[in-house]
Image (tube, helix red, strand yellow):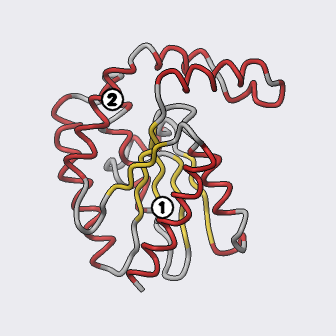
Amino acid sequence: VAVFEGMDAAGKGGAIRRITGALDARLYRTIPIAAPTDEERAQPYLWRFWRHVPMKGRLTLYDRSWYGRVLVERVEKFATPAEWSRAYAEINDFEEQLARNGGILVKYWLQISKEEQYRRFKEREATRHKQFKITAEDWRNRKRWAQYQTAASEMIERTGTSAAPWTLVPANDKYHARIQVIKTLCDRIEALL
């Protein structure tokens, strides 16, 4: 299981495409995480993620993940303080269960500077085939940069465990970031096999 988190425009999708471009499409799934559906809201929070955990020998890549509870839902106040505070223990238990049952979990936080994010946003606006990647919500989220950074710091501190450590990826240089992502994934798989 590979989990990709990071600020908007940090390069999560590009890193995922570089990994999947080298794989047999029958052996992996990419799960883009958006707002939960009505069906998902009617279930326990982690249910929507459990159902995509791959069988042995397969790979699931989450483009955003269960960490939304302690990031977006926390900052945007979609979850109560009790809900997002409780989520740290729930997430650590979930990841421990994956590891205990032979799963390999690799978690990435891709970090870009506020200036680089602005440059990438402007580039998306100016590039016709990238315009779909930038929305008013991206600009609105940018105004909460400090809140997202605080939430991310606490998330990394409270959920980086020996079974599921975070890989912090400096992503201002997207090519360097992609190499680090691929290398870390290969090293982690090799170490745990």
Viewer-nearest residue: 66 or 186: 186
Residue at the disc numbered 2: 149
Residue 63 at x, y percent in the picture: 53, 48
Query: What residue is rendered at 41% in x and 46% in y?
Result: 109
Circle 1 SS class: strand
Q: Residues within 10 Å of mark 2 (few under 14, many from 20)?
A: some
Residue kind at label 2, given as amino acid type: Gln
Checking the image for residue 2, the label placed there is 1
Viewer-nearest residue: 171 or 68: 171
Query: What residue is rendered at 17% in x and 43% in y?
Result: 86
Q: Is residue 33 left or right of residue 152?
A: right
Residue 45 at x, y percent in the picture: 33, 47
Residue kind at label 1, given as amino acid type: Ala
Q: Residues within 10 Å of mark 1 (few under 14, many from 20)?
A: some
Circle 2 SS class: helix
Mark-to-mark CA distance, 1 and 2: 21 Å
